[in-house]
């Protein structure tokens, strides 16, 4: 059977899943990530969770097609509610969603005690990275790795976090840009924030055309523009 070929984005996510982890891939879509990791013998067990019927069926078919039913359980359910205690999950991956949605999934998982607070989290938000980092900090999850990648003209951030026994604190600057990404300002990192600058300049120009400009909003946007320029220079 031919091996699963992961996209560049998912390949980088896969690189952060610990060896021999018991993985819960939430919002698994076609279950490509767990299938690839099992085929590589990087992990021996995974739960592929899906809340949308179409992707759930596709994940079932993918696992069956590759004869991986003994290693991957595809489950229909919302977020981490698909996890059971005897799964003994050690890593959770959530990719391709907004940061606020990932936050809500994790928050429900913690409140419902679906998470043991021992799992490593490998997260790939499409937007709302600051929102997600802020949640991780308030829940005492320490960011241990980050990466920013570009694929098909889209830019993605990967955030890897693990529970901490000590209080976790990040500055607003670190929450916005990423503590690890700030220390390695790659070309992709700068490209992302140059694009953000263009959006802010456009919004500011539209505000300035208003007969009664919102001074508070103008001030806020100007501060954001200054912060981005100082960060990427």
Image: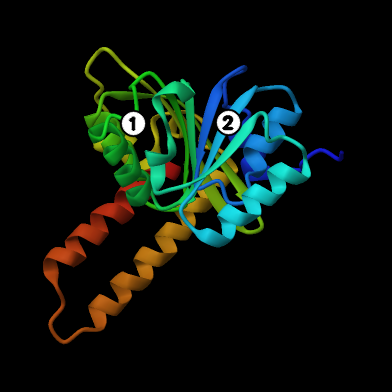
Name which residue lies at 26% across and 24% down: 140
- Earlier in the chain: of badge 1 and badge 2, it is 2
Q: Secondary structure at mark 1?
A: loop
The answer to which of 69 and 105 lies nearer the viewer is 69
Element at label 2: strand
Q: Position of residue 154 (x, y in %)?
A: 58, 56
**The image quarter in which residue 134 lies:** top left
Residue 82, placed above or below residue 85: below
**Whole-percent x, y for residue 42 in the image:** 68, 22
Q: Is residue 229 above or below residue 15?
A: below
Image quadrant containing the C terminus: top left
Residue at 76% x, 37% y is: 67
Q: Give the crowd class for mark 1: few <14, some 14-19, many >=20 residues within 10 Å.
A: some
User: How would you rate the neighbour count of disc 2 (Cα within 10 Å): few for under 14, some for 14-19, many for 20 or more?
Assistant: many
Q: Residue furthest bottom?
A: 211
On residue 10, which mark appears?
none
Report x, y in % for residue 175.
31, 37
Q: Closest to the observer: 172 or 109? A: 109
In the image, is 197 to the left or to the right of 70? left
- Outermost residue on the top side: it is 165
Q: Is residue 189 left or right of residue 8?
A: left
Q: Please report the residue visible at 67 percent of the width from the left and 43 percent of the height from the top.
A: 32
Label 1: which residue? 114
Res. 46 mark: 2
């Amino acid at each position: 059977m031919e091996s699963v070929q992961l996209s560049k984005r998912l390949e980088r996510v896969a690189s952060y899943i610990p060896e021999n982890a018991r993985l819960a891939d939430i919002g698994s879509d076609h279950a490509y990530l767990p299938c690839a990791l099992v085929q590589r013998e990087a992990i021996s067990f995974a739960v592929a969770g899906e809340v949308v019927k179409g992707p759930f069926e596709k994940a079932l078919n993918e696992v069956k097609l590759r004869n991986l039913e003994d290693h991957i359980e595809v489950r229909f359910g919302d977020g981490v509610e698909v996890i059971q205690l005897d799964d003994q999950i050690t890593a959770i991956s959530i990719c391709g969603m907004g940061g606020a949605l990932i936050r809500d999934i994790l928050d429900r998982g913690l409140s419902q005690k679906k998470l043991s607070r021992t799992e490593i989290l490998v997260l790939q938000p499409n937007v709302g990275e600051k929102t997600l980092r802020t949640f991780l900090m308030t829940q005492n999850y320490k960011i241990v790795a980050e990466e920013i990648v570009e694929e098909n003209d889209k830019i993605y951030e990967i955030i890897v976090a693990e529970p901490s026994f000590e209080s976790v604190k990040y500055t607003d600057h670190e929450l916005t840009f990423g503590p690890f990404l700030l220390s390695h300002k790659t070309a992709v990192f700068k490209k992302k924030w140059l694009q953000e600058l263009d959006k802010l300049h456009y919004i500011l120009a539209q505000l300035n055309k208003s007969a009664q400009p919102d001074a508070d909003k103008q001030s806020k946007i100007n501060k954001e523009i200054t912060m981005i320029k100082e960060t990427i220079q």
